[in-house]
Amino acid sequence: MTTDGDTTYRVVPVRHYGRWVAAAVIAVLAAMVVHTIFSKIPTGQVACSTTNGVRACHAVMEWRFGWDVVFQYFTSSLMLKGLVTTIELTLIAMFIGIVLGVLVAIMRLSPNRLLSIPAWIYTWFFRGTPVYVQLLFWFNFAALYRYIAVGVPFGSAHFFTFDTLNITAFIAAAIGLGLNEAAYMSEIARAGLISVDEGQVEAATALGMTRAQTLRLVILPQAMRVILPPTGNEVISMLKTTSLAASIGVIELTGAAQNIYASNYKIMDLLICASLWYVIMTTILSIGQYYIERHFGRGALRNQPLTPIERLRRDLKGIAGKMHTSRPGVVR
Amino acid sequence: MTEFMVDAKNIAKQYGNIEVLKGVNLQVKRGEVTCLIGPSGSGKSTLLRCINHLEKHDAGELFVDGELVGYQLKDNKLYERKSNEICQSRSEIGMVFQRFNLFAHLTVLDNITIGMVKVRGIAAEVAAERARELLRRVGLENKEKNYPSQLSGGQQQRVAIARALAMEPKLMLFDEPTSALDPELVGEVLDVMKDLANSGMTMIVVTHEMGFAREVADTVYFLDQGVIEESGDPQQVLTSPRSERLKGFLSKVL
């Protein structure tokens, strides 16, 4: 409503007819898809029974998406073991990736060429070869180096020897995924480190902080704001990339699903079952990512935006306020 | 103990082919306020940054509190000092920057205590108490929980001064402390600096505030193209300049 002098006019909003039609089409298509997902189809078999001398027959139906099978295996011990392995692999690989990645990024930014060039070569090599190939490479590492020993350089005395045949599929997957991740993490960390204003370093230096203190107390905490969002993506991506480990025989989530459908041929049902677990875990990770980003965003914005839960509470309060009083609700 | 807090003899500094400082002499007595004025690119900031070794000078001798900056003279050789020794001597010199450079991820209180706790090893509670005292001194006692982005430029610069004072410096360096401020906020920062000068702090101030220089400074140096053109008592230097360059400069800034 708008007032012009003493007269009051009604405001007529613009009608978006095109949008309405598009929305209707999408709504119908979505309804159809949902319907097929939760529909039953005939198996081709017929079941007959005789009641009071009357014989009745009907087609046997089953879920198109095999929901009964999906939930039968959803919490089976094989799938749960696979889930735990997936989580373990993700955590170990990301730990290697983040620690090594930050180290490579710091080396890359060093004024000393002997540090920066190896760091560049590392990133170049591990980004330049496929993860799948790298996993196979580490799994077959014994073909290149039968033993790894710590001793006198170029000498023959050894203090410690490791038999590379002891590299299991799980270790090969953890190393391969971690080293590959470190290459990507180093670029993410480097972007974060160079995003911090030069003045921050000067102020820290002028206070008498050492280079290590400046990095730890001033640069890294501020770089985190830039580093975290892509790192969250990397964790989510890693969770799914661990499925490649199935190819070298690690029984993680996908491997477990494969093992089960190899014996009962319910391929789609078990793939859906594994996918559900992946979706649940990535959802949890996304929520965690949101709150971690908020924590490291302190000081970057004048006022922190509300969390979705806080916003919901505020909106509910607004509605409740409107219901209790007949006055127009004020949203705080 | 020498008479001079800072004694710079024939300081030269080059960036690539550009000579920023061409043999500068500067002497600052204890408890005195020295202002460096001059057009941009004249080397004022570089000279200031040499004094706490943020920049390495290429030639000349630079003494702070009687000690050679960045080097040690032994057996007729200049040994470069180890980085922890340089950090130690830097921590005794306070510095205030044009762009404030407060640590954006820390609250006002943490900005002031971080140097005391991490560099000096003072207990956190003692440091916090001293920080609150300093905040009262710069008139910001109710802002300790704020982040720098929530403060005005003038408030940020006053926190930056408190942060530098927390280290109990023997010398304070100011690099154009009011140049990034809105005109109405300049006064509050200059007031804090005047108080500091009156308390007997030795200060070197790179500034374009000629009023401040005239009122507070004991000595004014005019730099132009890496050379000190004129220096002396502010009244004399600022009101009756001898060199043409200083006359030209003053006519532009006043």
Image (cartoon, grey):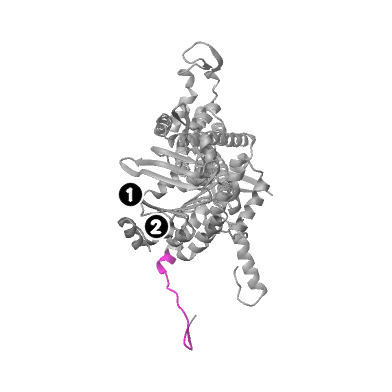
**Relative to A30, residue A127 above or below:** above
Q: Residues within 10 Å of mark 2 (few under 14, many from 20)?
A: many
Residue A92, above or below B202: above
Q: Which mark is residue B237?
A: 2
Q: Residue A324's x, y, as percent?
A: 67, 73
Q: Is residue A245 above or below residue B118?
A: above
Residue located 62% across and 43% down the image = B117
* Mark 1: amino acid: Gln
Classify mark 1: residues with Cα within 10 Å, few (<14), some (14-19) or many (20+): some
Q: Pointer 1: what residue?
A: B225
Q: Are marks 1 and 2 in contact (CB under 8 Å)?
A: no
Most foreground residue, B234 or A99: B234
Task: Relative to A322, say whether B159 is above or below.
Answer: above
Residue A23 visible in image: yes
Mark nearer the N terminus (1 vs 2):
1
Depth check, mark 1 against mark 2: the one in front is 2
Find the magenta span and give its range.
Answer: A3-21
The residue type indicated by label 2 comes to Val
Q: CA distance from mark 1 to mark 2?
A: 18 Å
